[in-house]
Amino acid sequence: MSDYVRRVRAKMGNEFLLMPSVTALVFDEQRRVLLVRPSHRDNVWVAPGGAVDPDEQPQDAVVREVWEETGLLVEPTELRGVFGGPEYRVWYANGDEVGYMMAVYECRATGGALKADGDEIGEARYFSAGELRSITLSRWARIIVPEMMAVRGPVLPRVTWRPSTNH
């Protein structure tokens, strides 16, 4: 948790907080996707990522988050989509409620060595599309990861907004 979020939480407690975030889709040569298992969640896998700090560019945030969680240096190559809504709401063990607005970047590994940080992340490894059926993905990862593996290029989320007729 960043110092910024700590200060906000000190003022507002566990109430819902809308949080800008980034997620990385890092593919290897076999087109397997890198997933991580957070230490606080048994057998639940997600794509690496996290919150965007104040005044931080989202592309810099995705590079920082992948480095911190996995030990890999990456280069964002494409913005694959921006997602939000009830599927991206998370409740943490301490009672914090967060709604993530998630910018998903495809990234290319450029250096480093794959190793879970051992603190926030318990395990990090690559999965093929077929292997995704044998693991438990988080609610939001079930929406994003399989589709992004199957489709090249940006994925446009469904639009459900309707203009109000009360004008």
Image: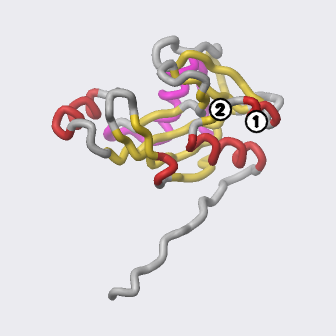
**Residue for point 33% across, 28% down:** 94
Is residue 165 left or right of 28 when viewed as pictured? left
Q: Which label belongs to residue 133?
A: 1
Q: Pointer 2: what residue?
A: 136
Q: Quadrant of the N terminus?
A: top left
Position of residue 49 measured from the top left corner of the image (x, y, whole percent)? 51, 33
- Residue 129 is a magenta residue: no
Position of residue 62 measured from the top left corner of the image (x, y, whole percent)? 51, 35
What's the coloring here? secondary structure
Q: Where 32 sits versus 142, above or below?
A: above
Position of residue 10 measured from the top left corner of the image (x, y, whole percent)? 18, 32
- Residue 63 is a magenta residue: yes
Q: Where 43 sits versus 95, above or below?
A: above
Amino acid at circle 2: Thr
Q: Which label belongs to residue 55?
A: none
Residue interval drawn in magenta: 54-76
Position of residue 163 measured from the top left corner of the image (x, y, whole percent)? 44, 79
Amino acid at circle 1: Arg
- In this view, the residue farthest toward the left is 11
Toward which corner of the image does residue 131 lie, by quadrant?
top right
